[in-house]
Image (spheres, helix red, strand yellow):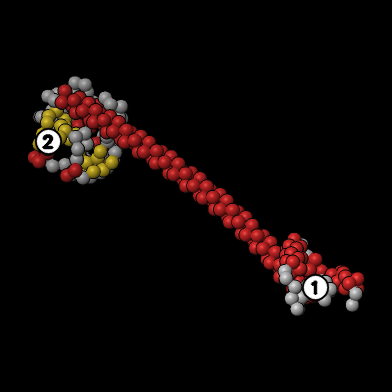
Amino acid sequence: MSLQTSHIRRRRRASQSPNWVRRAGVAGGVIGTLALTGMSSSANAEPSAADPATTGSIPVIPALSTTATAAQAADAVDETVVEQQLDAARTEARTEAMKAAQKKKAAADARSRAAAKAAKARETATASRSAGRTALTASSSTSATGSVASVIGFLKAQVGKPYVYGATGPSAYDCSGLTQAAFRTIGVDLPRTSQAQSTFGTPVSVSAVQPGDLVFWGGAGSAYHVAVYIGGGQYLDAANPSKGVVIQQMSNYMPTSAVRVL
C-alpha cells in the first residue's frame, strides 16, 4: 500500500466517525495531541527490527483505540457537566428553602409579637378597670360611711325630745317620723309609716345588722315600730310618750326584722 493511499483511508475513517466522537471536543483534541506526541517519540527512538521505520513505511495509530479513548473522555466531560448542574440545582434549592424558612420564622415572630402586644393591652385594660372598680367601691364605701355617721349624728341630737304620735319634728317625733327626718338629712326619702319603711331597702338578718340599718318589730309590711341601729348592741328610737327619743339596748327588746338602706 502506498503512503498516499494510507493517508486517504485515514481521512475517510475520521470523516465517518460517529457523532459522539466529535462531541468529545477539547478532550478528544488533547488525546489526539498526546497520541501524535507518542508517535514522534517513537520515531526518535532507536530503530528495531519490528520498527516500521526500518521498512520505510509510516506508523499508523490504531483508530479503534483512539476512538474509544475519546468516547470515554467525552462521557467523563458530560458526567462532570451533569454533576455541576446538579450541584448548582441543589445549591439553589437549599438557598430557596433557607429563604422560605426565614420568611416563615419572621412571620411567626411577628405573630408572636402581635399576640404579646394584645395580651399586654388586655392586661392593662383589665388592671385599669379593676382600679376603677376599686376606686368606685372605696368611694361608695366612704360615702356610705359618711352618710351613716350623718344619720346617727342627727338622731343623737334628737335624744330627749318628746314622743308625739304623728309628729315629724323638729320639736317632737313618733317612731317613723324620727327615722324619716334622719334619712332626709342625707337625701334619702323614706316612706312615712313603719309598715311602708319595713319594705324599703334590702332585707338583712337581725343578727347581721350594721350601724345605720333600720330595725323593726312586726313582719315586713306589717311592722308596728321602727328604730335605727347605732352599733354596740344599741338602737335609737322615739320609743313612746313616757320615754320620748332614747337610746336602748337591743337585747332588752329584740327587733324581729331589719333592712339596709345605705
Look at the picture and state if 218 lies above or below 243. below
Residue 151, horizontal then vertical, whole percent = 22, 28
Q: Quadrant of the C terminus?
A: top left
Q: Give the spatial CA distance, label 2 vs label 1.
A: 145 Å
| Displayed quadrant of residue 131 | top left
Residue under circle 1?
53
First in sequence, mark 2 or 1: give its number: 1
Q: Residue 188: horizontal and vertical position, in percent?
A: 30, 30
Q: Secondary structure at mark 1?
A: helix
Q: Note whether residue 166 is visible.
A: no
In percent of width and height, residue 122 lies at 42, 42
Residue placed at 72% from the left, 71% from the top?
Answer: 46
Residue flagged by tag 2: what amino acid is it? Answer: Gly
Task: For residue 21, say whether it is visible.
Answer: yes
Q: Would you place residue 233 above or below residue 56 in this image?
A: above
Looking at the image, residue 188 sits to the left or right of residue 215; the answer is right
Residue 86 horizontal side relative to residue 125, left or right: right
The crowd level at tag 2 (other Cα within 10 Å; few <14, some 14-19, many 20+) is few
Figure quadrant of residue 211: top left
User: 158 or 92: which is nearer to us?
Assistant: 92
Q: Identify the mark at residue 232; answer none if there is no mark.
A: 2
Q: Spot the residue most to the top.
A: 171
Taking the spot 30% from the left edge, 27% from the top edge, the residue there is 187
